[in-house]
Image (spheres, rainbow, N blue to C red):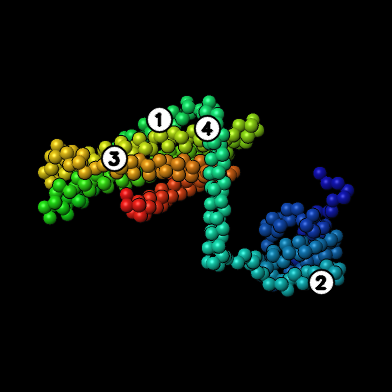
């Protein structure tokens, strides 16, 4: 519905003598559907008469629409009955060549490196802040242990620990088989078959069992933490908790950290058993070392400190996995697509940090002669 203040709509009609008569207001407000209507009209190449006797007004938007239409057909405007000011505007726009829209300059390699470094620094500071908040919440919870949600902790232990037993047991068994097979292939050339027991024991108890258990849990449970919390962020459940004065870290993060801190060391012990069993089977097949002989040497050579090293590493890995998974979940923004991105980041960062921590443990144990 048009009011008295609306400009007359732009229109165009063919002349009996050839050409077109322009009428109305060819301005940004008055063009309406004229740009699409022009697509239905054709004009031959060469000069095209444009009569402006009925033209009420025209601005740069209307001139641009006309010039684009003329250039598409290879035509040029022959102006008739145009006021001098309008004719000057039409001429100026017509003299400008068609140019593509300017594109923003691409970032240089140094700029891209700087942006990635800045993003990594901001994320590291965010993680440090998150760890500090979780530490403060844990201290407050220790002061009031009745607030610990044991039902949630036990539920997480079942999901993260008990339900993961089959995959960790099978993976560790096969890893023990591989270690024993590779060792047997070399040791039998030197008549040192019995040392495969030491190889399997130290490799599984100190390194492979805690590491493979942590990697599997990072992909299985760490991603679940991130997806769960990320979905709650998207659906504004986290905002609702804060509105009700419920600390999301106390409710969501600490039970997961506690549950995984209990479950992963136990899973590591289970991985030790299945890995050594796999090595025992392969030693029997490849080197003719019987089960009693394998168990006897294993009991004499392996010490409790070897087991405790692997279990202690797994406890640190558990904290890393739980904190990274929850941290990336809280960083979710906007949509379900962000949930997927943060879940992927949590798995990648958890596995990377677990391997970094394992390398640091190896350096520290070497310096301490452990």
Residue 304's disc number: 3
| Circle nearer the viewer, 1 or 4 | 4
For marks 1 and 4 on the same chain, the one whose residue lies earlier in the sequence: 4
Distance between mark 2 and mark 1 Cα atoms: 81 Å
Q: Residues within 10 Å of mark 2 (few under 14, many from 20)?
A: few
Whether residue 55 is visible here, answered yes or no, is yes
Q: Which of pointers 3 and 2 lies earlier in the amino acid sequence?
A: 2
Which element is circle 4 on?
helix
Q: Disc 1 marks which residue?
A: 158
Image location of residue 179, percent across then percent down: 23, 48
Find numbered disc 2 in the image and state the secondary structure of the residue it sits on: helix
Q: Earlier in the sequence, mark 4 or mark 2?
A: 2
Q: Quadrant of the N terminus?
A: top right
- How far is mark 4 from mark 2, CA to CA? 81 Å
**Which of pointers 3 and 2 indicates the residue nearer the eye?**
3
Q: Which residue is mark 2?
A: 88
The vertical placement of 214 against 31, above or below, is above
> Distance from label 3 to label 2 (Cα)?
95 Å
Q: Which class describes the residues within 10 Å of circle 1: few (<14), some (14-19), or many (20+)? A: some
Q: CA distance from mark 3 to mark 1?
A: 27 Å
Q: Nearer the viewer, residue 228 or 106?
A: 228
Question: Would you name the residue on which mark 4 appears?
Answer: 142
Dot 1: what SS? helix
Q: Please identify the residue farthest to the right as the structure is shown.
A: 4
Q: Is residue 223 visible?
A: no
- Mark 1 and mark 4 residues within 8 Å of each other at the beta carbon: no
- Quarter assignment of residue 9: bottom right
Q: Residue furthest bottom?
A: 95
Q: Earlier in the sequence, mark 2 or mark 1?
A: 2
């Amino acid at each position: 519905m048009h009011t008295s203040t609306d400009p007359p709509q732009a229109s165009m009609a063919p002349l009996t003598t050839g050409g077109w008569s322009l009428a109305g207001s060819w301005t940004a407000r008055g063009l309406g559907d004229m740009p699409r209507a022009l697509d239905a009209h054709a004009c031959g190449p060469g000069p095209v008469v444009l009569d402006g006797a009925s033209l009420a007004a025209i601005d740069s938007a209307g001139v641009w629409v006309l010039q684009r239409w003329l250039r598409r057909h290879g035509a040029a405007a022959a102006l008739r009955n145009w006021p001098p000011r309008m004719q000057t505007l039409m001429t100026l726009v017509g003299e400008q060549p068609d140019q593509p829209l300017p594109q923003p300059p691409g970032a240089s390699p140094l700029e891209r490196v700087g942006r990635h470094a800045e993003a990594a620094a901001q994320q590291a500071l965010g993680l440090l802040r998150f760890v500090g908040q979780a530490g403060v919440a844990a201290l407050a919870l220790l002061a009031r242990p009745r607030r610990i949600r044991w039902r949630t902790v036990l539920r997480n232990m079942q999901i993260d620990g008990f339900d993961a037993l089959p995959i960790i047991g099978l993976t560790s068994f096969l890893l023990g088989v591989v270690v024993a097979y590779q060792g047997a292939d070399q040791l039998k050339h030197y008549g040192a078959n019995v040392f495969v027991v030491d190889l399997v024991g130290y490799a599984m108890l100190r390194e492979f069992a805690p590491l493979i258990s942590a990697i599997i849990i990072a992909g299985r449970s760490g991603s679940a933490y991130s997806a769960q919390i990320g979905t709650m962020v998207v659906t504004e459940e986290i905002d609702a908790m804060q509105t009700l004065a419920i600390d999301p870290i106390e409710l969501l993060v600490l039970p997961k950290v506690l549950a995984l801190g209990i479950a992963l060391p136990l899973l590591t012990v289970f991985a030790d058993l299945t890995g050594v069993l796999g090595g025992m089977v392969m030693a029997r097949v490849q080197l003719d070392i019987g089960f009693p002989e394998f168990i006897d040497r294993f009991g004499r050579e392996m010490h409790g400190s070897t087991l405790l090293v692997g279990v202690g590493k797994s406890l640190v890995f558990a904290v890393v996995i739980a904190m990274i998974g929850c941290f990336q979940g809280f960083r979710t923004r906007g949509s379900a697509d962000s949930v997927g991105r943060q879940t992927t980041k949590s798995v990648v960062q958890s596995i990377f940090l677990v391997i970094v921590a394992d390398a640091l443990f190896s350096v520290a144990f070497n310096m301490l002669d452990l």
